[in-house]
Image (cartoon, rainbow, N blue to C red):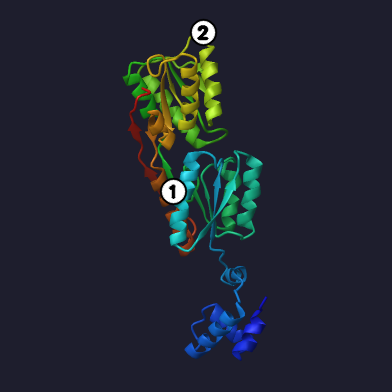
Amino acid sequence: MATISDVAKRAGLSRTTVSRVINQHPYVSEDKKKLVEQAMLELKYVPNSNAQKLRKQSTETIAVYVPRLTNPFFSQLVETMEEVAVEEGFQLLLCQTRYNKQQELNYLQILKGKQIDGLILTSMENPWSEIEPYLLYGPIVLCNDYDYSARVPIAHLDQVMGGYIGTKHLIDRGHEAIVYCSSEPGISRVSKDRQEGYIKAMQQADLKIRPEWMFSDQFTVEGGKRLFYRIHHQKDRPTAIFTGSDEVAAGLIHEARKNGYRVPEDLAVIGFDDQPIAELMGLTTVKQPIDRLGKTAMELMIQQIKSKKMGDARRVELPFELIIRETT
């Protein structure tokens, strides 16, 4: 494998001159550039990109932390982020936390070790007070999950409103016995605010909120199937359920129909996100503008990296849309 010394010898120039050409130094003549480029071509020499980035104190890499890559919401979010990043000359490093606090802290060491230029958190497993000290090592942007005490850019949606409009839709359809299911475990602000929206809609309609109709930590198709049986075996069965995920809704509907339930006549179901499965199943859902959310978060991050200014606490809040289909 050719080295920079081999290139210098073939071009008849010093190592310093070759290095300046490789690193696009402005004060090198065109003749010398051509000599170096020809020598590199003949020797099939490829510059060490990691060394170049280190000299520039830039990795041109942005990390995105997601809790679960198999969730279509997060995979679509990341895909949009990557499109924006690539256009700006950055690459993505994906880190899956699996809703694990220690895993998230372990991954934060990547920022501390200057292996990335910045990171985007789509879910927070630890309190912001545990994450904030890492701002000393690079910019952080919050996307989807949020904490208003964080002095960093945030791209998110008003989850209280999301929970409210989904629940109110069921109430407007004549339902009074409504289950709420959270799809976000742990300390997620998303989950807490969405539940607050559910409670707000129920209280405005003067409807009873029963503890046995409040479920949490269900965020997969299998979780939806399990949730159905927990409802099915209750003495006082609800007539409607607001799930926090289209995946959960899909699993629940599958088991309900398998057990002779008619949807929505016996059990109305509303999902969240408007993933592709929602349209296929005719699922009523609260749509999140996932592409806009990912694009906005990545743009906020790149602006932080390029400006090199910390303390930007902009909040970009995007709107929900209720998509009404056959399940309600």
Q: Amino acid at mark 2?
A: Lys
Instruction: Look at 61% across and 68% down and name the residue there.
Output: 50
Instruction: Look at 53% across and 42% down and name the residue there.
Output: 123
Q: Amino acid at mark 1?
A: Gly
Horizontal and vertical percent position of residue 99: 59, 38
Q: Is residue 103 left or right of residue 267?
A: right
Q: Quadrant of the C terminus?
A: top left
Residue highlighted by disc 2: 235
Q: Is residue 250 left or right of residue 43?
A: left
Residue highlighted by disc 1: 294
Horizontal and vertical percent position of residue 254: 48, 23
Judge by depth and name the residue closer to the eye, 308 or 89. 89
Q: Is residue 145 visible?
A: no
Note whether 65 is above or below 37 in the view shown.
above
- Residue farthest toward the front in the current orientation of the protein: 42
User: Within 10 angstroms of label 1, few (less than 14), some, or many (20 or more) residues?
Assistant: many
N-terminal label among 1 and 2: 2
Q: Is residue 63 left or right of residue 291?
A: right
Instruction: Look at 44% across and 62% down and name the residue there.
Output: 88
Note whether 97 is above or below 90 in the view shown.
above
Q: CA distance from mark 1 to mark 2?
A: 43 Å
Horizontal and vertical percent position of residue 129: 58, 44
Residue 240 in which image quadrant: top left
Q: Quadrant of the N terminus?
A: bottom right
Q: Secondary structure at mark 2?
A: loop
Note whether 225 is above or below 189 in the view shown.
above
Q: Secondary structure at mark 1?
A: helix
